[in-house]
Amino acid sequence: MPIVIDEEACMACESCVELCPEVFAMNDDGDMAIVLNPDSTADCVDEAIEACPGEAISR
Ligand code: F3S
């Protein structure tokens, strides 16, 4: 499954970007995360899923 971010659930806390910058970034407005590499198998994706306060990330 590709990594996806629920736009409604993302609160722009940026934890995912801090934990896993090769996969996540903030959008140009800084109000939502975007997925740079939806097919990544990096372990840090799981860390970001755990850390996300909005439970916005799934894979
Ligand atoms: Fe949004 Fe969760 Fe990342 S709130 S910015 S998807 S850690």
Image (spheres, rainbow, N blue to C red):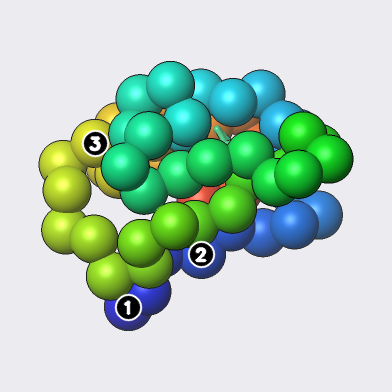
Q: Which residue is mark 3?
A: 44
Q: Quadrant of residue 6?
A: bottom right
Please tell me the numbered disc located at residue 4: 2
Residue 18 percent across, percent down from the top left: 43, 21
Q: Position of residue 32 (x, y in %)?
A: 73, 43
Task: Please count the marks in the image.
Answer: 3
Q: Answer above or below: position of 15 versus 20.
A: above
Of callouts 2 and 3, the N-terminal one: 2
- Give the SS element for disc 2: strand
The crowd level at tag 2 (other Cα within 10 Å; few <14, some 14-19, many 20+) is: some
Instruction: Identify the residue at horizontal 32%, vertical 78% (top origin).
Output: 1
Q: Quadrant of the C terminus?
A: bottom left
* 56 sits to left or right of 36: right
Q: Ligand 1 is located in which of the four quadrants?
A: top right
Instruction: Identify residue type, mark 2.
Output: Val
Q: Amino acid at mark 1?
A: Met
Mark 3 is on which residue type?
Cys
- Would you name the residue on which mark 1 appears? 1
Residue at the location (33% across, 34% down)?
A: 20
